[in-house]
Image (tube, coloured by chain):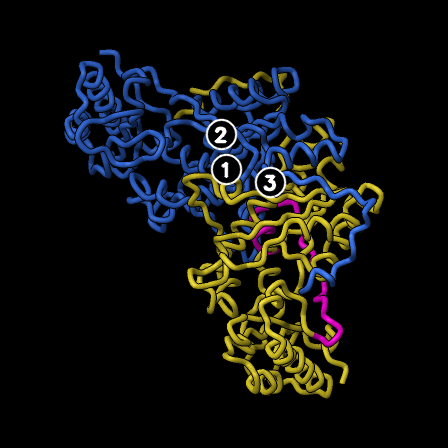
Chain colours: A yellow, B blue
């Protein structure tokens, strides 16, 4: 195509403005449309699979501090469950969830809000095959043991972010790798969402809150404390100056090994990239555990030197 | 987690509203924020790789009819080029492109607008590995001959849609499979974007406009007309009642075979799903051609019974 084929620019016609960054572009669009710069900019979002516990409610409270309108999604996402996982028996109780959210999302409290509870066909329209992959971040830890899990997570959260249009999303740090995967997905897709990680909320005895704790029998519930015990042992060793990656893992592993039905991993990893640690740990380091107690898969983690040991004693 | 663990709902606290569709959700957010429902809702977007020709300008004109603010992106996207393709020599001339757009995007004309011309690091921040896959739609036709191409297309257009936030995007139908891939990606990711396909713009002699036509020597330019000739032959056979898939392909293939350096495909496919046609064609059917003339890869297509034959005679 020769340039001569194009309409000749008039010397009096101003060239259009050129912007080179996404941030500039968004500003320009917003100004051009005469919309308030805060339009859609104050939605804070908490994605959940329901079966809400106090950990979730803490996320909603954090969201209501960060947005003027809070959206909580309740969606048990089929694409993040493997064929032999607990999709069909995952606890579902919308009534109880709405009751739990009522005090937090009423007009009378700090932030108004709504619950987004789509069915599967709303999130995965007929013929849907589109999937989002984030690459290497999704490969270690749970990615090794739950093939396809983080593809399902990145995909559904991308869809939810596109649908909700939040400025902020608040996720729990218990699913530490999930938090990093979602943050990476949002950044890479140029979604204008700040992904905030909220500290793990624990029961009084140190067990990390999880909807899956409902699966535990009384004796399994007691054994499940081994994760917090392992993290605490490693955190205390780190506080005493232990920096050897394998020794820190061994500290955490011992109490878990004593009671777990099986262990998926007990690993120290770079807290931002999840790169493996060889020799001494340097920089921000996460210690993450996944194991089965009975048939229930449990995970827990802490960032060494930052998060307090889950068990005081 | 026992429900007893949750704060007891007060009998006077109203439950939050529950919405089950993305559309309801968007409405609710917009109303909650007090923003005009048209906020960010009138941006019309034309994604391009620059080297603009009259085909692109027709897309921009269509966009200006559909939006109050038109964004044209100019970005030669590295991830949609294979290692032996023409990324490095793809024509780039931002000055000429801006001159061409000036009359269409000036404040004085129907729609104000801007050009988004990011660099590669803006679109692919350091460490970016996130990719979008649309599944089976991306597999046949160009997908077979350009591995990874539609992953690159779906990924960059998803990023652009997230960055620009358009209500409408206008794409040319010359890249027919790309149009379907982008439409599917937007639908599946719940992006609130109408993806409009605009008819192929042709030179006076019938050659589909393409930035890659600039690669053609004078003699190759003459040979390149074979694509339009093949499409016309098949369109005329279809008009005479020919419905056999293989015969329609043979009609189109003969003139291409006579002059092309190599043929990637000459195929009839379902125009919505790109499913293969066996026996007689039924429903909307696209006839698509990809071939090389010299070292230049050219594509062209038409929807049988809808699009006029590119050549009158």
Q: Which mark identifies residue B195?
A: 2
Helix, strand or loop at disc 3? helix
Secondary structure category for the residue under label 1: helix
Kindly report the distance in space between the C-alpha atoms of the residues bearing marks 2 and 3.
17 Å
Front residue of A176 and B69: A176
Instruction: Pinpoint the chain carrying mark 1.
Output: B
- Cα separation, mark 3 vs mark 1, equals 11 Å
Of the numbered discs in the image, which one, if any, rests on residue B265?
A: none
Does residue A204 belong to the magenta stretch?
yes
Q: B219 or A26, which lies in front?
A: A26
Which residue sits at x=18%, y=14%?
A: B240
Relative to B301, residue A255 above or below: below
Q: Position of residue B44 (x, y in %)?
A: 57, 27
Circle 1 residues within 10 Å: few <14, some 14–19, many ≥20: many
Q: Which residue is mark 1?
A: B186
Residue B116 coordinates in the image, percent (x, y): 58, 35
The location of residue A207, given as percent across then percent down, is: 68, 73
The residue wearing badge 3 is A163
Q: Nearer the viewer, mark 3 or mark 1?
A: 3
């Amino acid at each position: 195509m020769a340039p001569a084929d194009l309409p000749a620019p008039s010397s009096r016609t101003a060239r259009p403005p050129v912007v080179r960054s996404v941030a500039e572009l968004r500003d320009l669009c917003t100004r051009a449309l005469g919309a308030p710069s805060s339009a859609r900019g104050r939605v804070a979002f908490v994605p959940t699979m329901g079966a809400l516990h106090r950990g979730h409610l803490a996320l909603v409270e954090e969201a209501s501090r960060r947005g003027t309108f809070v959206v909580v999604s309740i969606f048990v996402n089929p694409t993040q469950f493997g064929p032999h996982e607990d999709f069909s028996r995952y606890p579902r109780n919308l009534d109880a969830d709405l009751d739990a959210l009522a005090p937090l999302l009423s007009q009378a409290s700090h932030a108004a809000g709504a619950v987004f509870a789509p069915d599967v066909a709303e999130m995965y329209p007929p013929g849907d095959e589109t999937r989002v992959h984030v690459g290497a971040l999704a490969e270690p830890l749970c990615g090794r043991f739950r093939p396809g899990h983080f593809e399902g997570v990145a995909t559904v959260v991308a869809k939810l972010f596109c649908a909700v249009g939040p400025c902020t999303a608040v996720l729990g740090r218990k699913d530490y790798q999930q938090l990093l995967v979602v943050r990476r997905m949002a950044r890479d897709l140029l979604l204008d969402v700040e992904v905030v990680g909220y500290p793990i909320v624990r029961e009084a005895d140190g067990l990390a809150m999880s909807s899956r704790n409902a699966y535990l029998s009384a004796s399994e519930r007691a054994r499940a404390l081994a994760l917090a015990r392992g993290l605490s042992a490693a955190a205390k060793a780190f506080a005493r100056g232990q920096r050897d990656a394998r020794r820190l893992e061994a500290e955490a592993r011992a109490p878990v090994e004593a009671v777990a039905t099986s262990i998926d991993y007990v690993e120290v990893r770079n807290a931002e990239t999840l790169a493996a640690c060889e020799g001494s740990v340097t920089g921000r380091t996460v210690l993450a555990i996944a194991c089965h107690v009975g048939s229930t898969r449990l995970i827990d983690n802490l960032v060494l030197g930052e998060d307090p040991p889950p068990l005081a004693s």
